[in-house]
Image (spheres, rainbow, N blue to C red):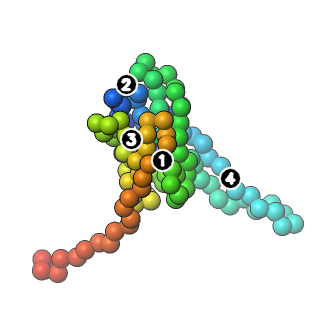
């Protein structure tokens, strides 16, 4: 089930890859110290892979900041060597995977806004 798909591409072998930003999966984190305190609501972000005819094949990734984890993947592209390049929007980086979901490399970091004082 797709919820907020935010990027799609087709691999050289015909797999359809979708950056799925919500997938209707919300989780509540609860702690206990004499009473339950439930306070954090978050959602999983992942890449879903479908066959040429649109049948679900597999998924990879999860929410987080580590390699192979995402925070709002917002773009996905397959290159000429069949690698999957993903813009990991809120982690401020690019991640590269195989079509099967094996993490290959991560690069980039949060930048800083540059102000042009000459345009006043």
Q: CA distance from mark 4 to mark 2?
A: 37 Å
Q: Against 83, is 72 above or below?
A: below
Q: Which residue is mark 1?
A: 103
Left or right: 103 in relation to 115: right
| Numbered badge on residue 14 | 2
Q: Which residue is mark 4?
A: 28
Q: Residues within 10 Å of mark 1 (few under 14, many from 20)?
A: some
Image quarter of residue 13: top left
Q: CA distance from mark 3 to mark 2?
A: 13 Å
Q: Position of residue 46 (x, y in %)?
A: 51, 43
Q: Nearer the viewer, residue 82 or 117?
A: 82
Q: Nearer the viewer, residue 80 or 25?
A: 80
Comes first in the chain, label 3 or label 2: 2
Q: CA distance from mark 4 to mark 3?
A: 31 Å
Comes first in the chain, label 4 or label 2: 2
Question: Seen from this angle, which residue lies furthest right?
Answer: 34
> Which of the two marks, 2 or 1, is nearer to us in this view?
1
Question: Which residue is found at the position 52% from the left and 52% from the top?
Answer: 69
Element on which disc 2 rests: loop
């Amino acid at each position: 089930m797709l919820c907020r798909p935010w990027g799609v591409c087709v691999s050289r072998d015909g797999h359809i890859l979708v950056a799925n930003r919500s997938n209707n999966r919300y989780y509540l984190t609860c702690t206990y110290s004499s009473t339950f305190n439930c306070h954090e609501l978050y959602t999983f972000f992942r890449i879903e892979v479908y066959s040429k005819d649109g049948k679900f094949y597999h998924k990879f990734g999860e929410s987080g900041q580590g390699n192979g984890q995402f925070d709002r993947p917002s773009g996905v592209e397959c290159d000429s060597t069949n690698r999957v390049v993903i813009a990991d929007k809120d982690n401020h980086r690019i991640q590269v995977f195989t079509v099967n979901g094996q993490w290959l490399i991560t690069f980039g970091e949060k930048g800083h806004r540059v102000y042009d004082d000459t345009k006043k």
